[in-house]
Amino acid sequence: MDISKIKEIELFLFDMDGTLYLGDTLYDFTKELLDTIKKQNKRYLFMTNNSSKSVSAYIEKLNKMGITAVYDDFITSSQATALYLKENSPNANLYVCGTQSLKKELCDNGFAVTDDISRVDCIVMGFDTELSFKKLDDVCKILSTRKVKYIATNPDYVCPTEYGSVPDCGSVCDMVFNATGKRPYFIGKPEPAMPNIAMKMVGCQKNKTAVVGDRIYTDIKSGINAGCITILVMSGETTPEILENSKDKPDFVLSSAKEILEIIK
Ligand SMILES: [Mg+2]
């Protein structure tokens, strides 16, 4: 695909960490990139697999770094999970192995969240920064004794931190697999649900939508699965070796999203 195709993109779906900032440090081009996209009457959305934080927590984080954002600028795996459940399991009683903010997102969407394991219809695993052994025990007990639906917000194994990484939802789901032999259906990237919802929200076609991210097995794969244009940035997790060995190839590989700014400016 010719690099000038990036000029025609009308909707950018940006991964955040490793793409627009690293930890708490904004990349120096990010503000100008977002401003330029807005000025050109194009759209961008922040697309995150992180289900431990609410949208308002992200707005606060971006504000602190000098970026203005509103609720409608986001598509999160928590929102996508709520939409998936509305379509596939309306009225389900949920056991949520996730943070209070994920529980709130699901409650706000009309679902009953319960700790009474005899009443559970569906287990929802999230990136649970409030994880306890009690929750793992409950999840294993439900999966081993009852027939319920089992879903998870995101398959990421680790979440980056200032000092390295911590286990994310995918790693906890592996622990549960080791105990029960059961694996959940994952909603976030690399599934196409989030890009699909985003395109519907904005009213933009696949061939004018780009997923931009630093991770191949989640960001880029979700774009490929949704049929969008995919842009891998080498400013985060992916090394040249990882790219070389991956069978999933993005349409474009850029050193960072700064190159997008240079192309569209
Ligand atoms: Mg990232």
Image (spheres, rainbow, N blue to C red):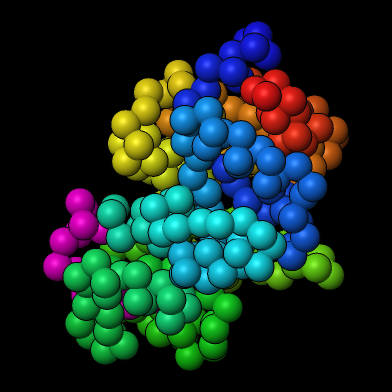
Q: Is residue 171 left or right of residue 104?
A: right
Q: Is residue 122 left or right of residue 134?
A: left
Magenta-drawn stretch contains 94: yes
Residue 120 horizontal/vertical position (percent)? 24, 77
> What residue is at 26 percent from the left and 89 percent from the top?
116
Magenta-drawn stretch contains 10: no
> What residue is at 22 percent from the left and 85 percent from the top?
118
Residue 117 horizontal/vertical position (percent)? 28, 85
Residue 245 visible from this viewpoint: no
Q: Which image quarter holds the C terminus?
A: top right
Vertical relation: 20 (above or below) 255: below
* Residue situated furthest left in the rendering: 91
Vertical relation: 117 (above or below) 207: below
Of the pair 10 and 234, the residue shown nearer to us: 10
Q: Is residue 264 left or right of residue 122?
A: right
* Residue situated furthest top in the rendering: 2
The quadrant holding residue 30 is top right
Residue 134 visible from this viewpoint: yes
Q: How many marks?
A: 0
The quadrant holding residue 66 is bottom right
Q: Which image quarter holds the N terminus?
A: top right
Vertical relation: 65 (above or below) 246: below
Of the pair 247 and 36, the residue shown nearer to us: 36
> What residue is at 31 percent from the left and 88 percent from the top?
115
> What residue is at 63 percent from the left and 51 percent from the top?
16
Of the pair 6 and 29, the residue shown nearer to us: 29
- What is the span of residues highlighted in magenta in the rendered image? 85-96
Residue 204 horizontal/vertical position (percent)? 37, 28
Residue 77 horizontal/vertical position (percent)? 44, 56
Vertical relation: 23 (above or below) 136: above
